[in-house]
Amino acid sequence: MRCIDAHAHLTHGHRGFHEFADSGVFDEIWLMDLDGMDLSGEVMATSDEVLAAAKAHPGVVFAFGHLDLGAGPDEIDRLRDRGFIGLKPYKPATNWNDERYYPLYARAEELDMPILFHTGMAVRVGNYAERKNGSCGYGPSGMRPSYLAGIGEAFPKLRIIGGHLGYPWFEETVHNLYYCRNIVHDVSGYRHYELLHELLRILDRTANEGSDRMLYEKLFFATDQFYGTETAMRTARKLKDFWMLNFELIGSIYHRWGRPEAAEKFFYGNAHAFRLGDCPRG
Ligand SMILES: [Zn+2]
């Protein structure tokens, strides 16, 4: 089955990624640029390294540029002109829905650049504060999933991805999925059993209520791996197997969400349509 890794990162001086991108494990890999940030001791690739990886694998690797929320809207034009297909801000100094950021979101909407907003639990960033001159914050609380709902309402044509499932505010993620047309979420990041259980229960409930909109249009697979080490690439393969086995051996037997057409959308179709702009809005 075709599969897209819709949220991953690249490490500085990465090894083995080119072979991995060529291997066919994933039909597409979307790299989220964090421009050299130090995440819990792992240094991320520079923006140029991320772009070079995308340019080396056209049609397979796509790059979202790191958006410094302290920059002006012109920065979005610059990121687009360099070849980024979307935007990835991280750790706002205040909250995602602070209206000071609205000119940025307005420009992203005008240029039809999707934004991936991290939601929920976040790892420690070592060198962020000095690098970004105070335009960043700390901890997860500025990145609650429900902050995206207002952005989605104010900018109804903006394509919004809530990265991860927003732990420990999972209910807010479910709210976004139900009520905000232009917000989708990727499932990367958390593998807490209770969260998976709750997610699968909700998928089943919507399917059984005759409303498939969460799974059918608004959730997709991603790994959030830091590509560039053997461990990350091995883990990504295992995550793909883990989710596919859940769909095939549990979902398809005991639940409606395991139907082949549902799996195809979760692993490929939803992310692919989102990238092409063929997704719910407004
Ligand atoms: Zn990430």
Image (tube, rainbow, N blue to C red):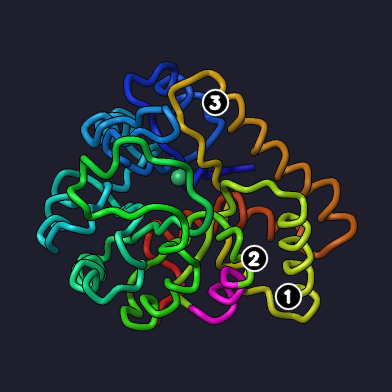
> Upstream in the sequence, badge 2 or badge 3?
2
Which sits in the foreground, 93 or 53?
Answer: 93
Q: Could you tell me residue 275's position as x and y percent?
A: 39, 56
Q: Could you tell me residue 97's position as x and y percent?
A: 35, 73
Q: CA–CA distance between discs 2 and 3?
A: 26 Å
Classed neighbour count for the residue bearing mark 1: other residues with Cα under 10 Å, few (<14), some (14–19), many (≥20): some
Q: Is disc 2 in contact with disc 3, using a CB cutoff of under 8 Å?
A: no
Q: Is 195 on the left or on the right of 67, as rendered?
A: right
Identify the residue position indicated by label 2 in the image: 215
Q: Is disc 2 in contact with disc 1, using a CB cutoff of under 8 Å?
A: yes
Q: Which residues are magenta?
A: 172-180
Q: Could you tell me residue 90's position as x and y percent?
A: 35, 52
Residue 233: give its label: 3
Q: Residue at x 33, y 61 (%)?
A: 114
Q: Is 75 on the left or on the right of 38, as rendered?
A: left
Q: For disc 1, does the CB lie below 8 Å from ligand 1?
A: no
Identify the residue position indicated by label 1 in the image: 206
Classed neighbour count for the residue bearing mark 2: other residues with Cα under 10 Å, few (<14), some (14–19), many (≥20): many
Q: Is residue 173 magenta?
A: yes
SS category of the residue bearing label 3: helix
